[in-house]
Amino acid sequence: MSRLTLVCLLAVVWALLLGEPGVRNLVVGLGLGVLIVRLFPRAVGARAAPRGAPDLRATLRRGAGWLAFLGFFLRELTVANVQVALLALRPRPRLNPMIVEVPLRLRGEGLLTLLSASITLMPGTVTVGLSRDRHTLYAHAIGTADAEAARASIVRVEGYLLALDTPLPFPPTGGPA
Amino acid sequence: MDDFQAVRDLPILIGAFFVLTAAIGVVRFPDLYSRLHASSKLVTLGSAGIFLGVAFALNDAAAFTRLAAVLLFQFLTTPLSAYLIAQAAYLRGLPPILGDGQGGGTDEWGALGRADEVAQADREALRVLAEEGLVDEG
């Protein structure tokens, strides 16, 4: 994510928190955003915007990818809640708990963070750990038939994120900030 | 019940139902890892429902924008705390209860076998942060 995008995002969050997205609040938010990005460049890991004209096609494709992921996420979140609620209320729930290992194709700290967070809120799985080289994810699963099914649901989430392979505001694994 | 408003009270009821099932799940599930499923997923949607109902009750634009910001942070932070609790438990050697007699039920992480590897990664991460001056070493 470029610094500019991040500053705009921070301004919007600021305006949302104040509850009045007026011009004045957005301007103050932009100021605060610039200050935060300046003060904590490493912590937020924002990059300078890429040189040259922006690739409109790629930007639109990424935007569509984000929307698709958001829709998928909200649907799965609802399914996950109903599923866990049923397990909690059933007289004798079939939890079948296990820890599964999932090899990852996804790279980049930002997207990996998003992946592990989403998995925790999605049906059947909670992230427990990442391997040292960030190439393997470990998740605790309940309510799934077997390890294969648990893995498949994680790979499905990963598929959505692979389509957005632009780093979030974090440096990629091992690379410079 | 003449002051029942579906748009306002339904989200609160649904949210309260999920928060209640979360509490039941936390009590009934067998171990820490299973309980995290209840406390992370159910509380997220449950509180979202309650927030939404409150925003409708206040019926104020500012309430909705704050609701959006609060939900954003909730979606970001709830999984993070679940992740930290799960990993800390695993690294401290709390074995998960596995399977219930049908299919699956394995610990592919290797019965705490790779905990050392993760602990090493954590130390490494701490060292990098210390080098950046973001945390104190030790």
Image: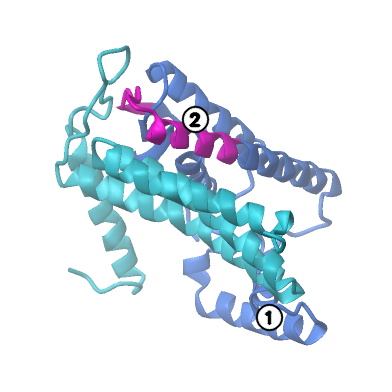
Report x, y in % for residue B89. 22, 46
Which disc is residue A109 wearing? none
- Label 1 resides on the chain identified as A
Labels 2 and 1 positioned on one and the same chain: yes
A105 left or right of A93?
right
Q: Residues within 10 Å of mark 2 (few under 14, many from 20)?
A: many
Q: Secondary structure at mark 1?
A: helix
- The residue carrying mark 2 is A154
Q: How is the image coloured?
A: by chain
Q: Residue lying farthest front?
A: B1
Q: Secondary structure at mark 2?
A: helix
Please, is residue B15 above or below residue A20 in the view? above
A145 left or right of A19?
left
Please, is residue A103 above or below residue B51 in the view? above
Magenta span includes A122: no
Q: Residues within 10 Å of mark 1 (few under 14, many from 20)?
A: many
- Residue A133 visible in this rendered orientation of the protein: no
Report x, y in % for residue B54. 63, 66
Of residues A26 and A176, the one drawn nearer to the viewer in this rendering: A26
Chain A: its colour in the image is blue
Chain in cyan on the image: B
- Residue B8 visible in this rendered orientation of the protein: yes
Residue beneath the point at 35% across and 72% down: B134
Identified by mark 1, the residue type is: Gly
Instruction: Return the disc, 2 or 1, that comes first in the chain's sequence.
Output: 1
Give the magenta part as a residue range: A76-101
- The residue carrying mark 1 is A29
Residue beneath the point at 30% across and 72% down: B135
Q: Quadrant of the N terminus of chain A?
A: bottom right
Identified by mark 2, the residue type is: Ile
Magenta span includes A93: yes
